[in-house]
Image (cartoon, rainbow, N blue to C red):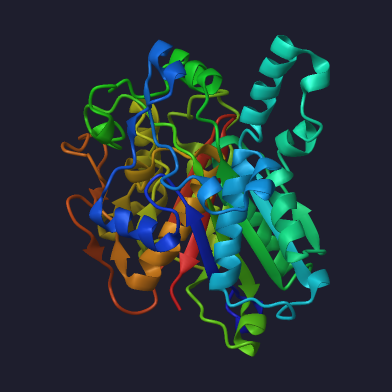
Amino acid sequence: MTDSQDRVVVTGLGATTPVGGDVASTWDAFLTARSGTRRLDQEWAEQLPVQIGAPAAVDPYEVLPRVQARRLDRSAQFALIAGQQAWSDAGMGEDTVDDERLAVVCASGIGGVTTLLNNYDVLKESGPRKVSPLAIPMLMPNSPAATIGLEIGAKAGVHTPVSACSSGSEAVSLALSMIRSGRADVVVAGGTEAAIHPLPMAAFANMQALSRRNDDAEHASRPWDVERDGFVLGEGAGVLVLESEAHARARGARIYAEVAGAGMSADSHHIAQPDPTGAGVVRALNEAMSDAQAAPEDIVHVNAHATSTPLGDVAEGSALRQALGSAADGVTLTSTKSVTGHLLGGAGAVESVATVLTLYHRQAPATANTETVDPELDLDVVLDKPRSLPDGPVAALNNSFGFGGHNIVLTFRSL
């Protein structure tokens, strides 16, 4: 959008991740390529073929009041913490925005799976009368969005996109549309996930999706590396405050970057595997750039979906080369999943936070653990240390793809 009255900007950021309980610590881990993966110490992990994961660095019970935390699924706890951070970071007060012009879009790929499974265990072991009366509001996928909405008094709408691992980015895309269409002036948008539990981990392991580097957990997530063998399951949340530029300027808000465009497509190829031609991803990439009125030459950085799976990483690289053409030679590529692991429905949101900070600080984080880049990737991966971005107006892409063939690409622009 070229008219400043139509622009949508980011004014607040929040995160709680496997490498930090806030944005500052998470960003520091991205810059230093510090991995959050470790061997799990729960007894149940000993029976699983995959015994590593990326749990949150700070337990929600250390942040939230105990009574409040007990009434929320872990996924909603993460969302609330990140949402509170973003709201405060944006400088929002009680009367900063009309509550009927305020919305929330917070995604989750799975929802309150630990609440569901734990209460099923209670049902089997102790009978129906022992099941928590709060189980339903805790396990429903819209609980994180509703929790944030109640916290800030949002009345323009509270929504929960569910599109597997692209859910967090779809939330940002929907928030962008809500502001552009005039439904809201401010939208708190993000994604969350808390699925480090024996059943999801066993299921992911049995479908050969997870890395099995049980004896080398720290280096297990290695996007594009020739020895990559699957992703690492992480947990946490990322939240951004999106705002019309006119509203942000009127209240004197600090602006991190512009949310300039979004592209969306579906592969209709396979429930779990990417389309090897990359056609759907190419369409989403082209739509995201077109929506932002950006040319391939304007793109200087891509925060890639790259999960560390053998097929997905190369397919994404091929799609980027097709969409960007010769301009791809001037683009730096990073996968922050090398640091956080894969946060499923929270991934696109945390990676949007990372992309915004990359533009704001003009520093592209390095990809951790990648030692030998797959020769099939013909792109410039940032390794070893951060890379400076060029001066002047520049744009960056954040890619998110999900089981079912969902493709979401976001374009962010520096201001």
User: Relative to 402, does residue 252 appear above or below in the rendering?
Assistant: below
In this rendering, would 230 be left or right of 243?
Answer: left
Locate the N terminus and report the quarter of the image it occupies.
bottom right
Q: Which of these two is toward me, 18 or 243?
A: 18
Q: Residue at x 68, y 49 (%)?
A: 68
Locate the C terminus and report the quarter of the image it occupies.
bottom left
Q: Which residue is drawn at 74% across and 36% down?
A: 140
In this rendering, would 202 be left or right of 100?
Answer: left
Q: Residue at x 65, y 51 (%)?
A: 106
Q: Position of residue 352 (x, y in %)?
A: 48, 56
Q: Which of these two is toward me, 292 or 398?
A: 398
In this rendering, would 113 be left or right of 344?
Answer: right
Q: Is residue 263 visible?
A: yes
Q: Where is residue 159 in the image (x, y as percent from the top left)?
A: 74, 51
User: Relative to 94, does residue 233 appear above or below in the rendering?
Assistant: above
How many numbered marks, from 0 up?
Answer: 0
User: Relative to 315, does residue 14 appear above or below in the rendering?
Assistant: below
Q: Which of these two is toward me, 18 or 142?
A: 18
Which quarter of the picture shows residue 361?
A: bottom left
Q: Which residue is drawn at 74% across and 15% down?
A: 123
Which quarter of the picture shows residue 162?
A: top right
Q: Can residue 289 be seen in this view?
A: no
Q: Position of residue 109 (x, y in %)?
A: 61, 37
In this rendering, would 388 be left or right of 291?
Answer: left
Q: Which of these two is toward me, 108 or 21?
A: 21
Q: Position of residue 312 (x, y in %)?
A: 40, 32
